[in-house]
Image (tube, grey):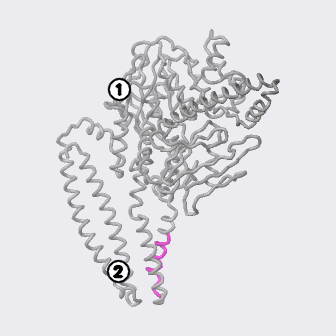
Amino acid sequence: MILLENIRKSFGAQTLLNNASLTVNSGEKVGLIGPNGAGKTTLLRIIERLEEVDAGHVSYPETVRIGTLRQEMEPSDRSILQETLRGDRELTELRQQHQQLQQQLHKNTHLTAAEHQHLVSQWGEVEHRLEEIGSYAAESRASAILMGLGFSRAALEQPLNAFSGGWRMRVALAQLLFSKPDLFLLDEPTNHLDMESVAWFENYLRRIPQTFVAVSHDRGFLNRVTQVTVELEGGELNRFQGAFDAYVEQKAAQLEQREKLLLQQERRIEEISRFINRFRAKASKAKQVQSRVKQLQKMETLESLASKADIPRIRLPEPCRSPLKMVTVRGVQKGFAGTTVFANVSFDCLRGEKIGLLGPNGAGKTTLLKLLAGELAIDAGQLLLGDRVQPAYFTQHAMDALNPEATLLAEAEAVKPQGMGDTALRTLLGSFLFSGKEVFKQVKVLSGGERARLALLRMFLSEANLLLLDEPTNHLDMESRAALADALEEYQGSLILVTHDRDLMQSVCSRFLVVSGGTVTPLEERLESYLERVTQTRNDAPQEEPSLRKMEREQRKQANKSQEQALKSKRQQAKQLENRIQQLETEQAALSQALADPEIYQSIHQAKLSELLARDKKVTAELEKNMLEWETVSLEMEQSPSF
C-alpha cells in the first residue's frame, strides 16, 4: 500500500530521515515508535504528502484514501451526530444531490418528457449509490461510534459548540472513524479519551480491516492493537514483526547478535594486527604481511547498534507520617448550576491505599479530586481528611502555573521544603531525569513532557502523603511513563489516580471506584472484566447508554418485580413494532413494484410518480425508525437480568 524509498528530510542542521525506506502492506496495523523529536509526526505528514521530502520517493495508489485525526474542529451549530456524518464526504454530497433532485421532481411540473426522464434517471443513480454506501444505516453507525467514545444518547443532538475542546476532539475522532479511509494515520489518538473509551477504541481498531499507522506513548495500547512495529531512530526506519513487546525482544536479540559479531571482528583484527607487527621486518614473510594489510584495509568495520538506555528511575521523597484513616467521605452532594454531579457519595481511603477512579469523562472524577484537594466545597454531607494528612493535587493546569521565564532549578527551589540542601535537591532533580546543565533551562523552552515532569517534581517536593493525580502521564514519553509507574508503585503514601493509561492503573492501584450516575461505588470485578463489559455494552446497545444502576443489576444478577413488569412491557412493545415493520415492508414491496413499472415514468403519470416517490421515502424512513426502535428494545430485553 505504502512504499517509502530512500527518504531524506532535514530541518536546518537537524536530519530527521536519512535514506529511510519502509513498506506498509494493505491491512497491516502498525505502531510507529521513536524518541521525542525523532520525526514521527513529520513522517506521517510526509506520507500524507503535506510535507515535501529532500530526496527519495513516496508512493501509493491514487485510489488510496488517507484519513488523519484533526487537531481542532471549527465551531459549528450542527449537532455532533451531523458533524460525524460529515466525515464521509461522498455521503454528504450524495444526500444533498438526492434532496435537490427530489425537490426538482416535485416542484417542476412543466418539464418535458425528456427532461423529466433525465431527472428520474439521475435520481435513480444517486439512490442506488446511497444504498451501496449504506446511507440508511449511516445515522445508526455514527451514533454507535459516538456512544462508543463516551457520548450519551441525549448528547448526540446537541451542537458541537456546546462541548469543550477535549470532547470536540472525540467528535473529530468519531468523524475520522465514520469516514472509513483505506489508511488511518493516528498521532496520539487516545490523549482525550477516558479509559473506558480507550478500551472501546482498541476493540474497534482490532476489528476493522483497514490499515493504520499509530504513534503513541502508551505501550499497552500498542501491544493491544498493533501487529507491526516500526522504529524511527537515528534517521532510519527499522521494521519489526509484532507489537511493542515483541519489538523489545527482537531488538534485544539483534543487539546481542551485533555485539557478538563486533567481538568476533575485534578478535580477528587483533590477530591480523599481531601477525603484521610480529613479521613486518622479516623479508620471508613480506608477502603474507602485505596480504594481511590489504585484508585489514578491505574489512568493513561494524558499528555498534544504539542500545536502548535503561529505564530511568524516579525516586520519590518519603511522605510525612500518616494516620490510619486518610479520607472519610459520607453522603457528599455536589452540583453546578442546577446540575447534580454527586447525589450521595460515601467511601474511605486508608493509609497506604492506592485507589483508581474509573468512569466516563464528565462523570465527576476530576470534580471528586478537586473536592478532596479543597479546591471546591461540598454542598452537603461530610468530607474529612485525617490528622496530619497533607494532600497534593496534580492536574494539567499545574504546568500552566510554571513561570516561563524562570529556570527549571529556580522553579524547584521555590517549593523545596525547609532543610533540603542543594545537593539533595539536585539529586531529586536527577531522579526526575533533569541532570547537568539541563536544570538551567528556562521553563519556556521545555517540551510538554519536561514541563509535566517538572510539575510532578514540584508536587512531590511538598512531602505530601496523599497524592491526587489527574492524568499524570499526559505529555510523558514511554520511558518517563515507565519510570513514573515504578515510582508510584514504590510510593509509601496514599494516592487517588485518574488516568486513561490502563497499564499504569493496573500496576499502581490496589482497588478501584467507579464514578458514574452521581454515585461512587467499589468495583467488584477485575479491571479487565469491567473494561470488556463496558466495551461489549457499547457495541451491543449503541442506541442507549446503560445507567450505573443497570450495570449494577447486571453485576449482581438481582431481579425484582419492577424489572419483570418492564420486561413484559418491552415484549409487548417489541411485538407491536414487529407487526408495524411487517406492514411497512409489505407496503415498501408494493411501492418498489410500482416504481419498477416503466409506464410510471411517462410524463402523463408525473403526478402519480411524485406521489409514489414521496410515499416511498416516508415508508423507508419510518421503517428504519421502527427497525432501530425494535433493535433497541430487543437489546434491552436481552440485557435484562429477568430475560
Residue 159 is at least partly visible in this image: no
Q: Principal SS element in the magenta part?
A: helix
Cβ atoms at labels 1 and 2 below 8 Å apart: no
Q: Start and end of the magenta stretch?
A: 96-110
Q: Where is residue 285 drawn, in percent x and y? A: 78, 28
Q: Who comes first in sequence, dot 1 or dot 2?
A: 1
Q: Quadrant of residue 337?
A: top left
Depth check: 325 or 29 in front? 29
Q: Secondary structure at mark 2?
A: helix
Decide: is 93 above or below 465: below
Tag 2 residue: 595
Decide: is 434 above or below 617: above
Asked if residue 108 is among those painted magenta in the image, a careful observer would answer yes
Residue 513 is at least partly visible in this image: yes
Depth check: 594 or 298 in front? 298
Q: Residue at x 50, y 72 (%)?
A: 97
Depth check: 210 or 350 in front? 210
What amino acid is labelled 2 in the image? Leu
Q: Where is residue 467 drawn, in percent x and y? A: 49, 22
Q: Is residue 566 left or right of residue 115?
A: left
The number of numbered discs placed on residues in the rendered structure image is: 2
Residue 346: mark: 1
Q: Where is residue 367 drawn, in percent x and y? A: 46, 32
Q: Quadrant of residue 379?
A: top left
Quadrant location, the N terminus? bottom right
Asked if residue 521 is among those painted magenta in the image, a careful observer would answer no
What amino acid is labelled 1 in the image? Ser
Estimate how packed mark 1 is, as few (under 14), some (14 to 19) or many (20 or more) residues with alpha carbons within 10 Å: some
